[in-house]
């Protein structure tokens, strides 16, 4: 994809942003960076406590990030090419996902599971492109250890770039599934993001956090903003991923807040038809 086409895609993306953000501009002014903002956020946090919403320490530090484009590695892509180097496992590559079963399960213990898998990722004969991924505690459990692809030093929370290691009842790693985001491009210069505290208070003010609940974690990651038809690429943005557990029912939900403009993001990203830009 040439630079001019990327520019056009980005223009279309900002048109979508205008639609999403336009209705909240008045509310947005209440979050201007100032002492007044700090006071308002403190008042919101007090309201949350009154509504029996539990949370830990919420950082008020702004971070930075980029708009990033990339596409999932599919048939003939980098992941399938690199998989030719794998040994001591049976694997197949279908619809952009590599599924592997080790010839001999790898014994681990509760104390060294992550350390053992970290070493495994360094072995190119066992895992392809392993140095592009990092352990993700929030997405992992006792049966599945999740590693997420790293984009500009932040995790990619998307099915387009994950390794999911399977752990059996004997605490052995039996294999994994893997996806990979390739042809990654930074679309614009670095920009500031909203803080963790602002993301949480924004969700509460928009009635996204139920009473009698607990915020389990909130992490800044990259997630998919929209799909394009140009080379099957997608656009990813810094996103606050917030996991909430309702105390009474035990239900767990994950919410996403665009860390550039505070928009609560959709579960299913929009698609933009950019075929008409191919000849521009």
Image (cartoon, rainbow, N blue to C red):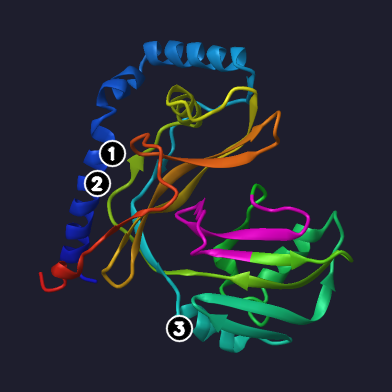
Q: Quadrant of the C terminus?
A: bottom left
Residue 177 located left or right of residue 206? right
* Start-end of magenta stretch: 139-163
Most distant residue in the front direction? 249
Tag on residue 16?
2
* Residue 97 sits in quarter: bottom right
Among numbered discs 2 and 3, the one appearing first in the sequence: 2
Q: Are marks 3 and 1 in contact (CB under 8 Å)?
A: no
Q: Position of residue 208 (x, y in %)?
A: 49, 30
Mark 3 to mark 1: distance in Å?
A: 35 Å
Q: Which residue is mark 3?
A: 75
Q: Position of residue 243 (x, y in %)?
A: 59, 39
Q: Which residue is mark 1?
A: 20
Residue 103 located left or right of residue 273? right
How many residues crowd around disc 1 within 10 Å: few (fewer than 14), some, or many (20 or more)?
some
Q: Which residue occupies 35% across, 56% down?
A: 68
Q: Quadrant of the N terminus?
A: bottom left
For label 1, the SS is helix
Q: Is residue 163 visible?
A: yes
* Residue 226 sits in quarter: bottom left
């Amino acid at each position: 994809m040439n630079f001019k086409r990327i520019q056009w895609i980005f223009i279309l993306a900002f048109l979508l942003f205008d639609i999403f953000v336009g209705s909240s501009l008045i509310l947005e002014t209440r979050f201007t960076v100032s002492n007044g903002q700090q006071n308002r956020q403190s008042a919101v946090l007090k309201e949350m406590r009154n509504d029996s919403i539990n949370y830990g320490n919420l950082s008020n530090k702004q971070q930075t990030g980029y708009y990033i484009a990339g596409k999932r590695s599919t048939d003939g892509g980098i992941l399938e090419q690199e998989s030719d180097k794998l040994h001591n496992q049976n694997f197949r590559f279908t619809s952009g996902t590599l599924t592997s079963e080790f010839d001999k399960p790898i014994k681990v213990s509760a104390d060294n599971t992550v350390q053992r898998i970290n070493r495994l990722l360094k072995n190119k004969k066992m895992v392809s492109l392993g140095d592009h991924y990092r352990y993700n505690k929030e997405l992992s459990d006792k049966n599945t250890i999740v590693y997420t692809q790293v984009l500009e030093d932040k995790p990619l929370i998307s099915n387009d770039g994950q390794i999911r290691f399977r752990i059996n009842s004997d605490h052995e790693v039996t294999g994994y599934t893997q996806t990979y985001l390739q042809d990654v491009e930074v679309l614009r210069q670095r920009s500031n993001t909203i803080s963790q505290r602002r993301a949480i208070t924004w969700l509460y003010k928009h009635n996204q956090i139920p009473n009698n609940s607990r915020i389990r974690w909130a992490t800044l990651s990259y997630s998919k903003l929209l799909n394009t038809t140009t080379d099957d690429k997608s656009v990813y943005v810094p996103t606050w991923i917030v996991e909430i557990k309702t105390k009474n029912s035990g239900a767990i939900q994950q919410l996403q807040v665009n860390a550039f403009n505070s928009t609560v993001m959709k579960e299913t990203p929009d698609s933009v038809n950019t075929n008409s830009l191919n000849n521009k």
